[in-house]
Structure formats: C-alpha cells, structure tokens
Image (spheres, helix red, strand yellow):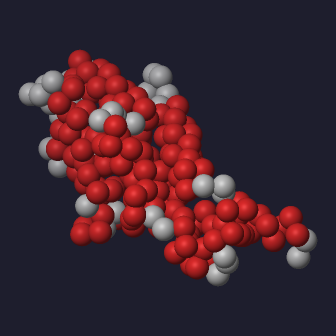
Amino acid sequence: MAKQERSSRTHERFLDASADEFVRHGYAGANLQRIATDVGMTKGALYAHFPSKDALAAAFTSAFNRVGHELLREVTEGDPPVKSLRHVTLGFMLRMQSDLRFRAGVRLALDDGLAHQRVPAVVAELSAMLTRLVGDAQEKKELTTRQCPELISSLVIAVIFGAYCTAPATGLDKGVERVRLLWQLLSLDAPGRAAP
C-alpha cells in the first residue's frame, strides 16, 4: 500500500475514533490517548494528523456547519411550505441518525453554545427558516394557527436536537418517526392522512 494511501486511511480512522469519543464524552471529556489507543496508534501519530484537540474538534464543527448549510440549501423556493418543513427537518434527523461525524459536530456545537451562551449558527439559521416556513404554511391553512410560528419552530428545534440529547435512552432511530408525527400532529390535512 502506498504511503499516501496508508496515511489517508489512518487519518480517516482517527476521525472515526474521534467522532465516537466526542459523541460519548463531549469536548471536555474527550481523551486523545483513548482515541489513539482505539486506532491502535500512538498519541504522537494522532498529533501528526491533528496538531491539537482543538484542531480535531474543528474538523467536526466545520463539517456540521457545512452539512447543515447544505441541508438548508435543499429547501426549494416554490415548494409547498409543509413539504419543505418535512424535508429539512427529516434531513437533519436522518443525518444525525446515519452520520457519526455529523453527530460529533452536533455535540461539539451544542456544548460550545451552552458554554458561551449562544445558539450555534446553523441552529439559528434552521430556526429562522422553520419560523418563516411555518408562517407560510399557516397562511396557506396547512398547519395549525393555534400557536405562533416562533413557538412551533422552537418546538421542532427541541424535538430534533432533543432527540440527539436523549439518544442513549431512546435511540436516534425513533427521532425520524417523532418528527414525522410532529408534522402530522400540527398539520391541518384531512384526518388520518399520513405525513409523507
């Protein structure tokens, strides 16, 4: 195997092990020696790929921001608001369910937000988009108008990121179904009509 290919595989293994470590322990509890041991390498080998714990964490937070913005850009103007709401929220849930590195970015972004008392940028943009789309859906009589768009948006954000926070107890696989049921609950579709 070529040296460059071996280095690339080691780099990817360090990323996978680090993602698992950050998901389990957050930034403060993550241990670089544990990561290196998990990969079967030395801590020095880890530092050859990532010069610091901050650099390693930045790989995940930047990926979270990049993927989060990609998911937000998938919303197509002109689509019915409820379709866009379902698409973007299920997109976030499915990505959290299937992508360990994305989950690591979520954990690190949420931890950083709590530590610095600020909402992560992607979460703030998602919230603004949801608020706008909920308002549009309410105007079209597709969603309940019993609550204001900001409250519904906050509820949906809590369900999405709360599913991540409660995953050890409930499992992330239930998050997608919860989001589907939430939109069905808020929808003014005909009774018994299932959400797509």
Q: Quadrant of residue 18?
A: bottom right
Quarter of the image for residue 1 reads bottom right
For the question of whether residue 94 can be seen, the reply is no
**Residue 69 x %, y %:** 52, 35
Residue at 24 percent across and 69 percent down: it is 169
Q: Position of residue 131 (x, y in %)?
A: 29, 26
**Residue at x 21%, y 25% (from the top left corner):** 149
* Residue in the foreground of this view, choosing between 22 and 86: 22
Q: Nearer the viewer, residue 77 or 169?
A: 169
Classify residue 87 as left or right of residue 34: left
Name the residue: 55% across, 50% down.
Answer: 54
- For this orientation, the residue located farthest to the right is 2
Image spot of residue 57 (x, y percent): 53, 52
In the image, is 184 to the left or to the right of 17? left
Residue 79 is at least partly visible in this image: yes
**28 or 19, which is in the foreground?**
28
* Front-most of residues 170 and 83: 170
Q: Is residue 100 above or below residue 64?
A: below
The answer to whether 173 is drawn above or below residue 59 in the figure is below
